[in-house]
Image (cartoon, rainbow, N blue to C red):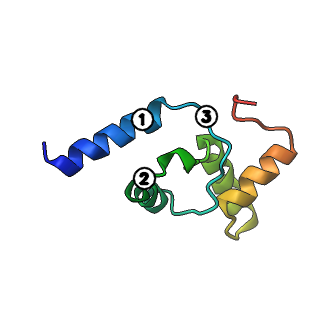
Amino acid sequence: MSGILIIFVQILRKFLTMGKKSVKLYTDNVLEEFYKHVLDGNIEDLHIPHSDVYYVREAVQNHYGKPFTLEHVEWAMRMEGWTDGNN
């Protein structure tokens, strides 16, 4: 394995095994944000929305016919009492 790949795997392993963080990801470019955090060395600050948020966003976008951000949908879900199981 190349050096960069080994570092990437180590960072990814740390991310997948670390405790839950409360920092929120307020962008729809999740993959870009992930790589940005990897390159900046602050993967601990990354929040990827729960899969429920993606499903609900798709449903409300189809229903209302307009786009919604992940941040808006997650906020609305929490206001309605939804939790991701960590609260």
| Quadrant, the C terminus | top right
Give how far across and how far down residue 39 sits, in percent.
38, 58
State if disc 2 and disc 1 touch (CB < 8 Å).
Answer: no
Q: Label 1 amino acid?
A: Lys
| Quadrant, the N terminus | top left
Give the spatial CA distance, label 1 vs label 2: 11 Å
Q: Secondary structure at mark 1?
A: helix
Q: Is residue 51 left or right of residue 82?
A: left
Residue linked to disc 3 = 20
Residue linked to disc 1 = 14
- Image height check: is 40 above or below 79? below
Q: Residues within 10 Å of mark 3 (few under 14, many from 20)?
A: few
Q: Nearer the viewer, residue 56 or 10?
A: 10
Residue linked to disc 2 = 41
Mark in front: 2 vs 3? 2
Q: Is residue 60 left or right of residue 58?
A: right
Q: Nearer the viewer, residue 84 or 5?
A: 5
Question: At x 74% / y 60%, what residue is drawn?
Answer: 72
As drawn, which residue projects farthest toward the right? 80
Question: At x 45% / y 38%, what residue is drawn?
Answer: 15
